[in-house]
Amino acid sequence: MFILLLLNISFALPDFYHQFDSINLNQYSNCAKIETLIEDPKVDVITINENAKFKAFLLFGEHARELISPETGLHLLDSICNNKYDVSKYQIKMVLNLNPLSRMRVENGEYCLRLNENNVDLNRNYDAHFKQYTDMEQQTNSGPEPFSEPETRAVRDLLKSYKPNMFLSIHSGSAGLFTPHAYSMEEPQNYEELMKVLNVIREDHCPMCETGLSSKNVGYLAFGSAMDYAYDEIGIKNSYLFEIYHKDVNMINDLRVESIKKQKRSFLELKDDSSNQECFDYFNPKEKEQYDWYTQNWSDAIIKTLGLVEQQSNEDIILAHN
């Protein structure tokens, strides 16, 4: 047992990953207006181009062990600040790291930690087809009631006040581009329109990604998710979830569609006694070349998604006035 514990804690966070508690978001003040929601814990919200008409809400880091999600958000922000993308048409709100207290613990070696500081799965805590269940072994504890957590309340308040045209949540642990719904096998009314966007992203950025209805593709129902809340309760008809990394799907060199079948070993099989090394590898690239490729690829994909949805929204407006 002692040897096993040594093996579990011996893996150090690669130095190209960020320590989020040491990031001073004020460094981006020249290219973005910074808002800070003083909740407990604090949730940092970055707003870009606050006068642009098309509004997008980007959510990173719901699950602490999915380090590559906030890393991609940070890369996207750096790229915007360095004028690598033309985002003049888009007003963007970014929550870079929704689960900061648990993220700090992951950075310090608890690589299997998914839940927040109250042992709640944030992506089961929204008031959208909420179902209370306590499964600590699988780390899908919903919490005692919807919005019991300060993090999900912060997202709720932002979505209600911001009223974006598009919602996108970034995760890892699979390779997929998903639409609502997560709680049922029911397709959303505008499923075909959502799929037009995802099919382009799949072709250009993730040919091996499973694409379509979230519940159908991941193989289980997820109640109380952020995406379903955005779609069903806030009314954001362009709501998506991207799963951007899985250790058994090599997006860089292996573009065979059949490689996706390896990922069917669900994250739910990662028990509390899984090694820290196994958890890190499952959700995050560990080589610098992979890290650079994934953060760049998915930053490009997010910007392309903004453009596709904005264009589609304008076409819908034109049709409505004809």
Image (cartoon, rainbow, N blue to C red):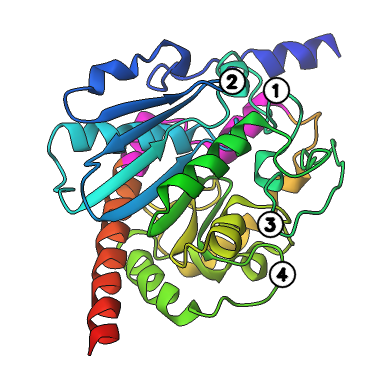
Residues under numbered marks 4 and 2 in contact, where contact means CB atoms less than 8 Å apart: no
Amino acid at pointer 1:
Glu
- The structure residue drawn at horizontal position 36% and vertical position 41%, both measured from the top left corner, is 93
On the rendered image, what quadrant is the C terminus found in? bottom left
> In 3D space, how far apart are the residues under numbered discs 4 and 2 (Cα atoms)?
31 Å
Secondary structure under badge 1?
A: loop
* Disc on the earlier residue, 2 or 3: 2
* Residue 262 x %, y %: 61, 58
* Disc on the earlier residue, 4 or 3: 3
Segment colored magenta: 275-295
**Mark 4 vs mark 2: in front:** 2
> In 3D space, how far apart are the residues under numbered discs 4 and 1 (Cα atoms)?
28 Å
Amino acid at pointer 4:
Ser
From the image, tell me which residue sits under label 3: 128
On the rendered image, what quadrant is the N terminus found in? top right
> As displayed, is residue 262 above or below residue 155?
below
Amino acid at pointer 2:
Pro
Q: Quadrant of residue 106?
A: top right
What label does residue 184 carry, if any?
A: 4
Secondary structure under badge 3?
A: loop
In this orientation, which residue lies closer to the viewer: 255 or 140? 140
Residues under numbered marks 2 and 1 in contact, where contact means CB atoms less than 8 Å apart: yes
**Mark 1 vs mark 3: in front:** 3
Label 1: few (<14), some (14–19) or many (≥20) C-alpha neighbours in 10 Å: some
Secondary structure under badge 2?
A: loop
Label 3: few (<14), some (14–19) or many (≥20) C-alpha neighbours in 10 Å: many
From the image, tell me which residue sits under label 2: 41
> In 3D space, how far apart are the residues under numbered discs 1 and 3 (Cα atoms)?
22 Å
> In 3D space, how far apart are the residues under numbered discs 2 and 1 (Cα atoms)?
9 Å
> In 3D space, how far apart are the residues under numbered discs 2 and 3 (Cα atoms)?
23 Å
**Mark 2 vs mark 1: in front:** 2
